[in-house]
Image (cartoon, grey):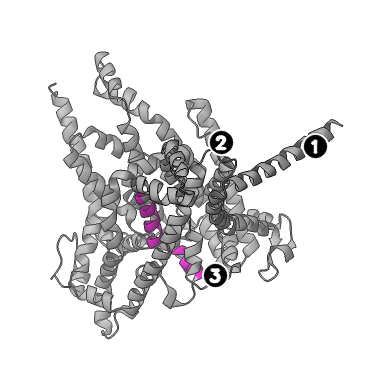
Amino acid sequence: MKKSLSEKTAYVLIIFVLVIFTVATVYPIIHVVMASFSDGDLMMAHQGLLLRPLEFNVDAYKRVFENEMIMRGYLNTIIVVAATLILNFLLTSFAAYFLSRKYLYTANAVMFFIMVTMYFSGGTVPFYFAVKNLGLYNSLWSIILPASANAFNIIVLRTAFSSMPDSIEEAALVDGANHFTILFKIFIPLSKASLAVVMLYYLVAHWNSWFNAMIFLKDRELYPLQLVLRDILVENDTSNMTGGASMDTMQAVGETVKYAVIVVSTLPVMMIYPFLQKYFAKGAMVGAVKG
Amino acid sequence: MQVMEKNKAAVIKKSNAITKTLADIKKYPQLYIMILPVIVFYILFSYRPMYGVLMAFQDFVPLKGIAGSDFVGFKHFITFFNDIYFGRILKNTVIISFASIIFCFPVPIIFALLLNEIKNKYIVKPVQTISYMPHFISMVVFCGIIRDFTKDTGIITQMLSKIGIETGTMLSKPSLFLPIYLISDIWKDAGWNAIIYMAALAGVDQQLYDAAKVDGAGRWHQLWHVTISSIMPTIVIMLIMRLGSVLNVGFEKILLLYNPGIYETSDVISTYVYRKGLQEFNYGYSTAVNLFNSVISFIMLIAANQISKKTTEYALW
């Protein structure tokens, strides 16, 4: 079918709008990356768009990697994320497997029990005391344990498990397998895509979380990366980064270090999500229908 | 007599449920071992805090706990309604929330519709990948970037001054908080929120378009009567869910962006709850304000659902 002139114009117009949208989305990211490789003094004097580094150098990154607080924060975050992901994997698959066994008398009641938590919460203060009363205050467990499972992710994985034919479970049970074997050896390998997306959601949430750490952690040595970042980016405290520099250069160094620290902290997540992108739509649909 | 019969029936039903559950546990012990840690998790970190909501009706003293603290009835609620900041935080919460429904909610829909018109996957894929990117940036970094771009020498401030708008540090101007909040929201999540609409658009039956063409429907007609009406249920459901969280504005974001100088336009219920509770240690009061927030949200969710059911036939339940 031939396209009319007005259709062609519309097409060009749509492309134009999408290009603007994309440029507006990507520019701030380019700005940050370019600034992180720039010279501090030039950055301070610079006006307008930044499309290439000003006198390319990696001084800011050197300072980031030499900084004890940031490296400590990085390590804390990795410990917390790893521990939480193990719990997430176990609890989410257990719950999803249980909820997808329709023959269980309590399956619906447990589903309700879990779904309620999506709509109701006690609020900041009661949550604070619930965690504190367990003796978790000022320990990394205070940010690990409360993030052990998430209702939305359980539902996404349950939907995947529900679509398995009943005959798989029956046949495995006849062969003498128990439910743990069925879950880990059959169901999980068969739902890799859903599980991968769920684990990505967990990973991103834990990597980026800071609020619980802020209210529960007192010692700075326990601070995860995001809390260290908050001091640098929001409280504007780059003093412990610029050590050794004179007053004049301090501000200039702080300027580029801020950008370098953003890149270093965000890169891991940015490198993972494009690989799982094609599964996002599935997860979103499940969430909207059941959530 | 009848009442007693009814009670008896209820008791039998209840004991029946317990016997049946016990029988179920005996029959499938492994499955119940699986669910046990999940139940424990939810009791410790979700249901115990819900029970903690009782402190909204108490002069809560941490050492005495909820069982030992004195009940004061609705005292905290009355104090809240008479609080000099009551009007301000309620107004800010409602304004920020409705403004984001009006300005931010439609953007992902428009973006998805535009992208849907492009059939070339070498354009669609990269545009989508880039549009997701800001969603994965952490709130702390995101707010750090906003602060940096809008400070007096920031790139956005500079650009505005080039076209003759002098703002200075933008986040110190109360009137600029809302626009900054809304535009940055669109930047961060419009692409991500479009996923659900893209998925709905992919599910539209191609035959509907063919039928419309046979009936002589033009491009605009097809867009309106086929495309948009096909994704209407998704739009309505997303809108209901949005209305249900109308009082839950971006708490973490505001906490990272605001400062006392712009409280008059940026302080909202949840940030007030945080300050009162964990910075000023007014535990009972803070919990009461939060409970007020939850109750209103719940009413909004039910109301939105009912209205939608009556007017569009689409509803969450």
Tell me how far mark 1 sits from mark 3, CA to CA. 45 Å
Instruction: Residue under label 2, please give it.
Output: B303
> Viewed as shown, does residue B55 lie left or right of B153?
right
Task: Give, as a three-letter code, the residue at label 2.
Answer: Ala
Q: Observer-nearest residue: A227 or B247?
A: A227
Residue A241, quarter of picture: bottom left
**x, y (%) of residue B111?**
29, 39
Q: Which residue is most to the top?
A: B215
Instruction: Residue under label 1, please give it.
Output: B8
Residue A174 is at least partly visible in this image: yes
- Element at label 2: helix
Q: Are marks 1 and 2 on the same chain?
A: yes
**x, y (%) of residue B224?**
32, 25
Task: Give, as a three-letter code, the residue at label 1.
Answer: Lys
Q: Chain of mark 1?
A: B
**x, y (%) of residue A12?**
16, 35
Crowdedness of circle 1 by 10 Å Cα count: few (<14), some, many (20+)?
Answer: few
Q: Nearer the viewer, mark 1 or mark 3?
A: 1
Residue A45, quarter of picture: bottom left
Instruction: Residue under label 3, please give it.
Output: A136
